[in-house]
Image (tube, coloured by chain):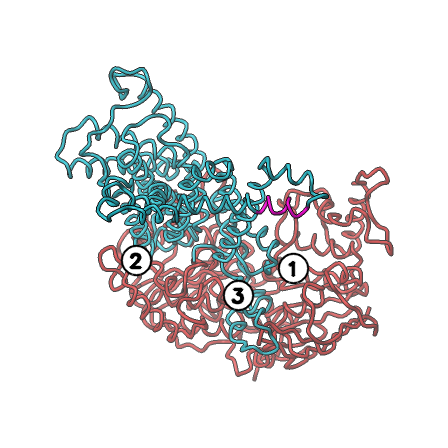
Amino acid sequence: MELELRGITKRYGLLAANDGISLSVAPGQVHALLGENGAGKTTLMNVLYGLTQPDEGDILIDGKPAKFGSPKDAIEAGIGMVHQHFMLVPVFTVAENVTLGIEGGLGASSPRGIRSRAGLLDRRKARRDVADLSHRYGLDVDPDALVGELPVGIQQRVEIVKALVRQANVLILDEPTAVLTPAETEELFRIIRQLTGAGTSVIFISHKLREVQAIADTITVLRRGKVVGQRTPPVTEEDLANLMVGRDVQLRVSKQPARPGEVVLDVADLTVGDSGGLPVNGLSFEVRAGEILGIAGVQGNGQTELCEALMGLRPTVGGSVTVNGRDLSRASPHARLRAGVAYVPEDRREDGLVGPFSVAENLILDMYDRPPYSSGINLNLPAIRANATERIEEFDIRTGSPGTAAGTLSGGNQQKVILAREVGREHKVLIASQPTRGLDVGSIEFVHRRIIEQRDHGVAVVIVSSELDEIYALADRIAVIYEGKITGFRDPDVPAGELGRLMAGGADSSGVPGATVEADGALRVDGADAAHDGDGAPAHAPQEEA
Amino acid sequence: MTNPPPAPPSPETGPSATPPAGDEGTGEGRDRSFGEHLRDAVQDSTVTVTLLALLAATVIGGLLAAFTNDAVLHAWSDFFSAPGNAIAKAWSVAAGTYVALFEGSVFNPHTVAALFQQSSLSTAVHDGYLSAVFNPLSETAVQATPLILAGLAVALPYQAGLFNIGGQSQFIGGAIMSAWLGYAVNLPFFVHVVVCVLGGFVGGAVLGWLAGEIKARTGAHEVIVTIMLNYVMQYFLAYLLSSQSLLQAPGTSNAITQAIASDAHLPLLAGTHLRINAGFLIALACAFGVWWLLNRTTTGFEFRGIGANARAARVAGMNVERNWALVMLIGGGLAGLAASTVILGTDFTLNPQSYGTYGIDAITVALLGLGRPGGVVAAGLLFGALHAGSPGMQTATGTPVQIVQVIQALIVLFVAAPPLVRATFRLRAARARGVSTSMSKGWNA
């Protein structure tokens, strides 16, 4: 099926979310839509999926104009969508989720339902359908599994099966890798290749340059609602990034060599857990003033628990945390903040911000009870406002006013609010977990620059990240975490293959680097190897600017 | 400010799927009618939803008043022979109901007429004719006083993310303290009433704190705890009033305490003919105090932060558990103050009817007031007016006083279900956010 969009325009008030966008998707192709947050990718897909109606422009399917009044029309035309946030019922099985809503079939054109004449459900047929599809595309989905118990990567495949059962010829994947581990991403790419091999087209929405490079046949770059360029890989990441942002972007922030001072943060034998397991198991490291320790690892190896334990948000069963010689092992979160620990949490919406609070209030969220923001029990509103104005300026936070609710800001600006707050008070340690997750290129550059600036001011910085690129970009020393333990410390010139081996649980020996890299982290490992001036770039490595 | 969006837009879908509202506001009239502008301007506001809920409840209440009236029903049985009569009868009953409510709660022209028929102003004042003019307002204030205080007892913890259903138990706790201090202790005039009022606060605060502390220590849901404490206190009061060695008045077999000493009465504000007393001022002062606490103090900042996102509040170093106990303590104290104003202001004894349904009405007042202090005052006054006007309404139109309860319930039903109001008045759904979405959060917290 050939899909074409012609001059799609969608306005919200004066803002044109989509402004005359045209593109076409050939059968069996992966068409990537690349753009920063707010560039209009999601609006365009909502138009295509019948969730919103365009003000102008046409959708053509095999050359014939189509009108989608609702997702139902789009589905009937063979368009399937996998949303960023899955639309699944956790207590239903895979088969039940897949057939939910189409028990009576897909309509007159393709009776495929599982409801018998008597009104009962034919569960066996439902399971068979799922098993068939799963087998055909190598999806490896168990029809009888409860969706709530499946890992995110498999849940995503359930969404794909849902679309396939509805006979989708064009599959829209909205930021599909945002929730996936590197290994799961690699799996997803394999599935996408299988689907396109069978003639299905895929529209792949992303703001991650490397992924788009790896999977797309055509790349369309959107900026401010307009198509600003179309590329066919291979292209350089710089080219794509500059198109996306509209100016020259530095993908790698330059930094001077570290000048480490005294040990500031000392973590010894830290253990977190209960009878159910020990997510952090006797973990030790130390960080000096003026250096960045990057903790690399595949998501879910105890990073979240480690950070929460460092901040006193999670009880520990053993070990100690010392800041500047002061033992904080039993201190409350409040006491640790006061002791000079700045914290940028992994989940910025849930842990970092109070969404309904204004930007100004969020900028003092952990300083409201200290002068100048309070006097006695009274809040000092003028000081709070003045602080907000200053920080918004300093950190280039794009907000309507200091009174705007922080929850309405874009992810990048939310992160700037948190960063501005945390480094705005006196601190000796900065712990940042996944500091650029979900951010666009421009914001990543900004956040990295600020973190390096902190280091240069003599702060001991800990970066926890599952993105090897980020670790390489920031770290002066790299620790790899696996199953709650540090499997090794390395200098930042370590080859990515070696890190990949440590991340997959390889013992800390000086064996042949990269010899036993498992599927885990394969994509990032390859990519990072290329980005990093390490030895032996892989064959498909994107070109670096010479 | 207080209502978290039901589903916060993700960083990716947010800006492109729903562009900031500000962009719409700046659209200076290009191809858009005045009506569209007006609709855009008002539909985001929950205040609008609330006002429309009031309107809807008023209309349905009028219909109910009319169509439960015998004369109207009789007229409508002859609808096809005399449709005009049927409609006129229904209208006159519905209108009469609201006119009577208004006359009983705000202003009755007949009292002015009576005032001017008096021979001289001094006799008019002396015989209470002047007071009669202001009596409806006085009664509204008297009825509103405990509703405002008890409403604040729900609204304040609500801001900290807790749903205080325990107004009843806290009210009883305050009532016991106020009444006992009122008759059993001998103190000079002004001191006595102050002690009794503070005692009421303490009595309620203890019960509120208990619920908060149980939640803080064990994680037990405050809704369950407070509801159960309501039963405990209800029967504890019945027990206290069952024996003369406890609180029961000597020489009676009724479940009632002695009358409190006259120097423990709350001072009247407008002469002996009107019941309005210092309790009303306490209620207004408390409303202001709660507003100040929430918006101007570090404690209130913690309360609101915890209410809006307890996880982020914890990460920011706030002690969530301690604040739960504290906010319930203050909330309980406010419910206790509500009891003080009833015992010391209007009832002067304590019996099992004293607590009425204040604890439950408090929830409706807080809901209608959108959980904000100013809103609670407005809602308390409205419900106070309905209470004050209902006896006169029954006398004048034969509409049963219970219709007032039905109207109250309808108001809250509409307020608690913004989608219902939006559907009724065709507001665009995606942008209006009601208090119910956040109220329901209280149950899941």
Q: Residue A265: x percent and y percent? A: 33, 58
Q: Residue A409: x percent and y percent? A: 48, 66
In the figure, is residue B111 to the left or right of A227? Answer: left
Please name the residue shown 45% across and 66% down the image: A415
Tell me the quadrant of the picture where the N terminus of chain A can be found: bottom right
Give the residue pinned by disc 1. Answer: A83
User: From where the camera sits, is residue A237 visible?
Assistant: no
Q: Nearer the viewer, residue B137 or B187?
A: B137
Between discs 3 and 1, the one toward the N terminus: 1
Tell me the red chain.
A
Q: CA distance from mark 3 to mark 1?
A: 26 Å
Q: CA distance from mark 3 to mark 2?
A: 45 Å
Q: Residue B445: x percent and y percent? A: 47, 44
Query: Which quadrant holds residue A368?
Result: bottom left
Q: Residue A480: x percent and y percent? A: 48, 58
Q: Secondary structure at mark 1?
A: loop
Q: Is residue B87 a member of the stretch shown in magenta?
A: yes
Please name the residue shown 35% across and 72% down the image: A389
Q: Is residue A162 a member of the stretch shown in magenta?
A: no
Q: Residues within 10 Å of mark 3 (few under 14, many from 20)?
A: many
Give the residue pinned by disc 2. Answer: B296
User: From where the camera sits, is residue A34 visible?
Assistant: yes
Q: Chain of mark 2?
A: B
Give the residue pinned by disc 3. Answer: A468
Tell me the cyan chain.
B
Q: Nearer the viewer, residue A218 or A189?
A: A218
In the figure, is residue A364 to the left or right of A443? Answer: left
Main SS of residues in magenta: helix
Q: Which residues are magenta?
A: B83-91
Q: Residues within 10 Å of mark 2 (few under 14, many from 20)?
A: some
Q: Secondary structure at mark 3?
A: helix
Tell me the quadrant of the picture where the C terminus of chain A can be found: bottom right
